[in-house]
Image: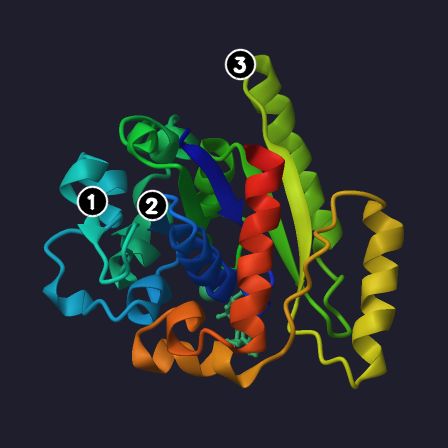
Amino acid sequence: MGKIIAISNQKGGVGKTTTSVNLSSALAIYGKKVLLVDLDPQGSVATSLGIEKSNLEYNVYDIFCNNKEAKDIIIKSDVANIDVLPATMDLAGVEFKLLDNPFRNYILEKALNKVKGQYDYVIIDTPPSLGLLTLNALYAANSVIIPVQCHFLAIEGLTQLLNTIRIVQKNKRENRKSLKIEGVLFTMLDRRVNTGWVVMNEVKEYFKEGIFETIIQSNAAAAMAPCYGLPVTKYQPQSASSKNYKLLAKEVMKKNE
Ligand SMILES: Nc1ncnc2c1ncn2[C@@H]1O[C@H](COP(=O)(O)OP(=O)(O)O)[C@@H](O)[C@H]1O
Ligand SMILES: [Mg+2]
């Protein structure tokens, strides 16, 4: 099927990487073959899956700047059904290097087109900015999941993100392509604190539809799992966040299959 989903929000710390890794691992548990693409120079996807970055021969930077093909960079992870296109700090320099390249927004799309057929889902983790890397993710993707942290100020910047999505959608329509909003995903909800519910109601007013029923609760297991190089579904399969991400995977599968 090769459905490409970008996990995007230019605000940092909202759960993009946690969602990318754990949605992927939950989809993998249900037998889906997943390619997890890291577009954040922090390279947290590799770390979260216990992949040692200093051992990598190539990384996603080589797609952008060295004409490498995705197939030469993709590595298997220790989690069944998950392959990774890893990122490292190299990626931080990509924006500057590609300033003069008129096709710079479409480099990832072109690279993924050649490999997406081998996967059920391609999940793209994006950096906390609306720059070149996020644009590459949005142009490559069929849809976008927007994680919104259930804290005050979470909504700031959503207008900017939506404006960017609208511009990409318009450009894609001209080429008979599309970018759907798969849904807004509420993350890190602390059920005991009022703030989360207030924020969720505000966002619901704003989006009306396109909000995932699944809510990711604030849960220590989700924050601890990367320290062990494991998705939370493996680190603590019975934890709230493991269960939440499995429900999210089911919701995504239901929408797409
Ligand atoms: N459901 C959760 N419960 C508790 N902590 C979480 C949860 N999701 C993410 N975190 C923690 O919050 C921080 C930010 O999450 P992260 O996924 O790295 O956000 P982003 O990729 O948007 O910057 C990390 O330290 C992460 O471990
Ligand atoms: Mg991140």
How far apart, in angstroms, are the residues tagged by discs 2 and 3? 25 Å
How far apart, in angstroms, are the residues tagged by discs 1 and 2? 17 Å
Residue 120 percent across, percent down from the top left:
39, 37
Residue 128 percent across, percent down from the top left:
52, 60
Residue drawn at x 87%, y 71% is 198
Callout 1: CB less than 8 Å from ligand 2: no
Residue 62 percent across, percent down from the top left:
20, 44
Give the secondary structure at mark 3: loop
Residue drawn at x 64%, y 24% is 170
How far apart, in angstroms, are the residues tagged by discs 3 and 1? 27 Å
Instruction: Please name the residue that numbered disc 1 is placed on.
Output: 62
Picture layout, residue 1 above or below residue 19: above
Q: How many marks?
A: 3
Instruction: Please name the residue that numbered disc 2 is placed on.
Output: 35
Q: Which mark is residue 175?
A: 3
Q: Quadrant of the C terminus?
A: top right
| Amino acid tagged 3 | Asn
Answer with mark 3 or mark 1, whichever residue precedes in sequence.
Answer: 1
